[in-house]
Image: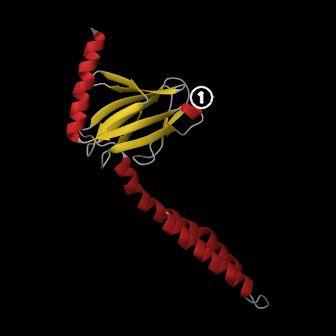
Amino acid sequence: MFFVASVVLLALIALWHYAIKRKTDKQPVGATSSWIIWGGIVLPTVTIIVLLVAGLPVGQRMMPLSDENALRINVTGHQWYWQVTYPDHALQMSDVLHIPVDTPVHLSLTSADVIHSFWVPRLAVKLDLLPGRTNVLRIEASEPGIFRGQCAEYCGVGHAHMQFTVIAHSQSDFALWLKQESIQELTLDD
C-alpha cells in the first residue's frame, strides 16, 4: 500500500507541476472533461482495484484455517483485565498468554462488558472484541520471545492498564509449561 500511495503521490505532484507551468490561452474545450475522467474516475478506480487485488491474499492469510493442530485459546476482555482460558487443558489465567512457536493459535475473542480491541503489534493485526459476539484471530510466533499486547479501543477509565503479555515458548518448553500448569491447577483444586 505504501508503494501504491507513493506512486499516486508522485503522479499528483507531476500533474500539479504541469498545471502550474502550462499555458492556458489556447486550451480546447474537451481538455477539462478529459482531466475529470482520467484523474477523477480512472485513476481512483485503477488504484482501488490494485489495492484490492494485492490486499485480498494478505487478508486471507490472516484468516483462521481449519487446522486440527491449532492451539485454541479463549480470550475475554473485561473492564480492565484479560481472562485467558485454554479449553482443551482446563487452564485459566489473567493478562498472559503462553503459546508454542511455529504452531497456529486460534484466539476466540469476546467481551464481557464493553468493546475492547486485542492487539499484539509483532504477532497480529488488531481485532475488536464485541459483547455477545466471538471473533477468531489466528496468530503464530516464528521465534520464542515475549510480546507485549494491549487494548487498542478506549474502554473506560482503566483502559491504560489493559495490557497483556504473550510468551512464545519452543515446542518442548511449551509442553513442559503446560504440564506444570496442569499439575498446579490440580493441586489448587484439591
Looking at the image, which residue is at 25% across and 22% down? 182
**Numbered disc total:** 1
Q: Position of residue 120 (x, y in %)?
A: 44, 43
Looking at the image, which residue is at 28% across and 18% down? 185
Q: Which residue is mark 1?
A: 158
Q: Position of residue 112 (x, y in %)?
A: 49, 23
Near mark 1 (Cα within 10 A), the count class, few <14, some 14-19 or many ≥20, is few
158 or 33: nearer the viewer: 158
Looking at the image, which residue is at 38% across and 38% down? 166
Q: Position of residue 8 (x, y in %)?
A: 57, 71
Q: Position of residue 118 (x, y in %)?
A: 47, 37
25 or 20: nearer the viewer: 20
- The part of the image, by quadrant, that contains residue 66 is top left
Whether residue 93 is visible here, answered yes or no, is yes
From the viewer's perspective, is 141 left or right of 134?
A: left
- The part of the image, by quadrant, that contains residue 180 is top left
Whether residue 38 is visible here, answered yes or no, is no
182 or 123: nearer the viewer: 182
Quarter of the image with the C terminus in it: top left
Looking at the image, which residue is at 25% across and 15% down? 186
Query: Which SS class for mark 1?
Result: loop
Q: Amino acid at mark 1?
A: Gly
Residue furthest toward the top? Answer: 190
